[in-house]
Amino acid sequence: MADSSVIPLSDTAILSDNSNDSSSTIVWIGMSISFTGTFFSALGLALQRLSHKRNNELPLCEQKPAWRQWLNLLGVLALFGGALFALTSYGMAPGSLLNCMAAMTLVFNMILAPALCGEVVFAKDVWVNGIVIVGTVVAVVFGPHREVEFTESELMALFDTVRFAVYFSVLVVILLC
């Protein structure tokens, strides 16, 4: 009886199966690190926005350049820290799962912008961010938890599939609209 979890590939393709407990734990740790990095990135952007907002409220003679505003520098450090978290997480989990986590920046921004910058959140923002959260959860739960490395010939063969033709056609139509 054939194993339904096996992806049909050539003998040269490398399939990394993360189904054992320790690999699965590492994937979830990687996703948690990515989630934390996304928060720090959103925090960095909010701190920079707050810094520029406060600086613009000052009289022109008292305004400082961006590199002398401590909140702006703190925001840059938070962005840098978020990037380091993301970089670390890519060694622990498939990129197809981690890239979904970047959408959470919108959610964190909706939370941090009113708290730090006094921005107003509308009901539409809450609904849209709810959709982002649901989409991220669905993508992470049902996304691939294994990585596949293809050979050059296997990648080129993927361009000759009906699936790629449909995808590319839809993409072109969307971009032209």
Image: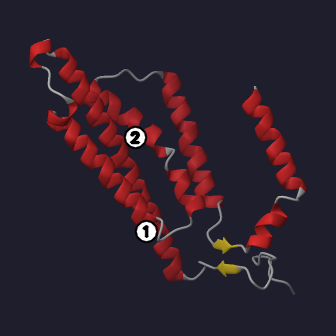
Badge 1 local density, few (<14 within 10 Å), some, or many (20+)?
some
Reading the image, the residue beneath label 2 is 108
Which residue sits at x=28%, y=48%? 78
Q: Which mark is residue 59?
A: none
Which residue sits at x=52%, y=58%? 98
Between residues 86 and 28, which one lies in front from this camera angle?
86
> Percent position (x, y) of residue 166?
86, 47
Nearer the N terminus, badge 2 or badge 1? Answer: 1
- Is 161 situated above or below 77? below
Between residues 61 and 14, which one lies in front from this camera angle?
61
> Percent position (x, y) of residue 143?
65, 60
Which residue sits at x=67%, y=73%? 148
- Is 57 situated above or below 8? above
Between residues 7 and 162, which one lies in front from this camera angle?
162
Which residue sits at x=36%, y=46%? 41
Badge 2 local density, few (<14 within 10 Å), some, or many (20+)?
some
- For label 2, the SS is helix
Which corner quadrant of the image does residue 75 belong to?
A: top left
Q: Which mark is residue 29?
A: 1
Q: Quadrant of the N terminus?
A: bottom right
> Percent position (x, y) of residue 46?
31, 35
- Is 8 situated above or below 175? below
> Percent position (x, y) of residue 132?
56, 40
